[in-house]
Image (spheres, rainbow, N blue to C red):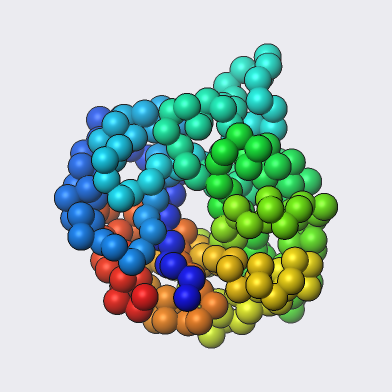
Amino acid sequence: MRRKFIAGNWKMFKTPQEARQLAKSLKIKLTDVRRTEVAVCPPFVSISAVQEILRDSRIAVGAQNVHLERSGAYTGEVSAPMLKDAGCSWVIIGHSERRQYSGETDDTVNRKIRLAVADGLSPIVCIGETLSEREGGQTEQVINRQFSACFNELSEDVFGRVVIAYEPVWAIGTGRNATPEQADAVHRQIRALAASRYGREAAERLRIQYGGSVKPENAADLLRRSDIDGALVGGASLDADAFTAIVRAAEDVT
């Protein structure tokens, strides 16, 4: 059985001091978690502060993005070796907000996956359709296209380091939620695509998170689904009680 994985994406929230306080609270509240893998992804400036708090805990630290090169004259960018040295285990790649506001493409996602894995980071790779694509009946087509491009010519070893987060863009911060049935159907599609490219065993090992406005109120219904292996949590990860409740929901169904 695949181990559930709950990751918090703090986005552009929490100063280093606020991040320390949230990390301290999560460390206390999640001390007894055993069956669920947990990670938090603070802003770059707070990674070291959060890592210092969580160093001896069961909560891993990740980043929200990584640059395409290992070093160079790229003002304002952060490389995979920097993230690894700062204590990161995970990195989010291809989040819908990066695609929307920063020009991220399936091709850059593919390149970043390669770089991240080569430098010892495990990628959380985000794919998902927009509202117009969902309403136009294009969800399956979009997922097929994104999967094919994002994992183009990646070896099975590299793919084995990846977690995929299905992000229905239309359900992020809009007050609209995908039903557990809608989410599970896309997760099954993603697993079938993985099986077609990498074989059944690799597909069964693959963990697929759901990333569309996960909250304590809907977490259990989502996480009970056989192909939903965790959650990439946005707003609810900024509240220690809410994030803890989501992790507890994963523990209960594991």
Residue 70 point in image, percent of width and height: 66, 25
**Residue 37 visible (yes or no):** yes
Name the foreground residue: 118 vs 48: 118
Residue 238 showing in the rendered view: no
Image location of residue 234, percent across then percent down: 42, 55
Q: How many marks?
A: 0
Q: Quadrant of residue 189?
A: bottom right
State the residue at coordinates (69%, 32%): 68
Residue 219 as seen in the image, left or right of residue 165? left
Extreme-bottom residue of the structure: 181
- Give the percent coordinates (x, y) of residue 35: 33, 66
| 179 up-or-down from 62: above or below | below
Decide if residue 211 is on the left or right side of residue 111. Answer: left
Residue 250, by quadrant, is: bottom left
The structure residue drawn at horizontal position 39% and vertical position 50%, both measured from the top left corner, is 39
Residue 144 picture quarter: bottom right
Q: Give the image location of residue 243, x and y in percent.
A: 30, 59
Front residue of 187 and 215: 187
In the image, residue 127 sits, relative to residue 42, either above or below, namely below
214 or 32, which is in the foreground? Answer: 32
Q: Quadrant of the C terminus?
A: bottom left
Q: Residue at x 23, y 56 (%)?
A: 30
Q: Is residue 55 left or right of residue 42?
A: left
Single out the residue that lies furthest toward the right.
153
x 53%, y 85%: residue: 181
